[in-house]
Image: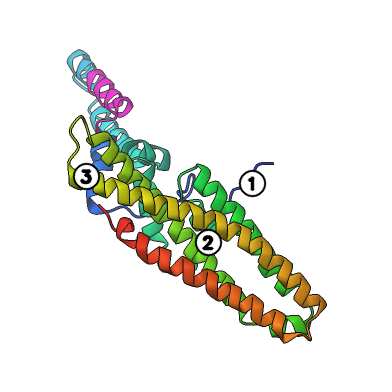
Amino acid sequence: MTEPRDPRSGPPAGREPASLSREERKTMLRAAALRPINLSILVVGVGIFATALAATGGAWWLLPLTLATYVSLVFLAARDPIFQRKVLGEDGVQQTSRIAVQGADVSPERRARWLARGETRQKVEDALVVYRKVVGAIEDSDEVTRAVLDDAVPRLHAAAERLVEIAGAREKAAEVARDLERGTGTSPTTARQENLRELRERIRAADAEISGTSEELVDLRAKVVRISLDSQNPARAKDLNASLDGLNARLEALNEVMAPERESP
């Protein structure tokens, strides 16, 4: 079954485009001005105006009408999300979408949709489905269980956020690694080979942690169920919180390792 599209998710289509940088706006205006269909309207309009002017000496109104139509088409094309993706590329539009919502309360599920479609994104989305089930199991439990697991929910949220951050850093590292592989040629330098080896190690570590997090979330859901059945046993709650602390510690440590690749140009 196809997942219903989140109307808030980006990059938007049919909604107001995300704010672009000054250079991106210039690029879009130039591309829209040189768009063949827009130029055709301009050329045809000017041609009709010249013909009418030569034949009748009138029809001056055709020139401003043609220019107004051309300017309108350029304006609309520059703000068209589909045309933006074509000109700036998918990554460029997604980047502006991220900047536009920076600082807002964006769910990890929505941030996961910014990842490129592929195995990594699928694994993260599957893990987030389980994460929501764990949170739901806590929120739907009885009052005593909710009180016992009060600290677990923010720990779960933190783990989900870090998981998405690691996945994003992993995709960036993979992109850089692909660029290095294409540039190795017949005589790769020692420094380039070392950088490539380090990137591959980080990618493998991220893949292992993403898969491991998904499996651990399944175990955490089972622990929540056991706690709800035996809420008077404080050891079970301590074990759950200890597992969440360990998960967050591993994710945070890996996030720090992957951080330089998120900042790579």
Q: Is residue 46 magenta?
A: yes
The answer to whether residue 17 shows anywhere in this view is: no
The amino acid at mark 3 is: Arg
Mark 1 or mark 2: name the one nearer the start of the chain. Answer: 1
Residue in front for this viewpoint, 36 or 112: 112
Q: Are marks 3 and 2 in contact (CB under 8 Å)?
A: no
Which amino acid, by three-letter code, is at mark 1? Glu
Q: Please name the residue that numbered disc 1 is placed on.
A: 3
| Residue 92, position as x, y percentages in the image | 34, 46
Q: Mark 2: which amino acid?
A: Pro
Q: Is residue 128 left or right of residue 261?
A: right
The residue drawn where x is 62% and y is 62% is: 216
Q: Earlier in the sequence, mark 3 or mark 2?
A: 2
Where is mark 3, residue-wise? 192
Q: Residue at x 23, y 36 (%)?
A: 183
Give the label, 3 or 2, closer to the camera: 3
- Residue range (magenta): 32-48
* Residue 116 x %, y %: 45, 45
26 drawn magenta: no
Q: CA distance from mark 3 to mark 1?
A: 41 Å
Within-10-Å neighbours for mark 3: few <14, some 14–19, many 20+: some
Q: Which mark is residue 35?
A: none
Q: Nearer the viewer, residue 256 or 93?
A: 256
User: How far, Cα to Cα, is label 1 from label 2?
Assistant: 16 Å
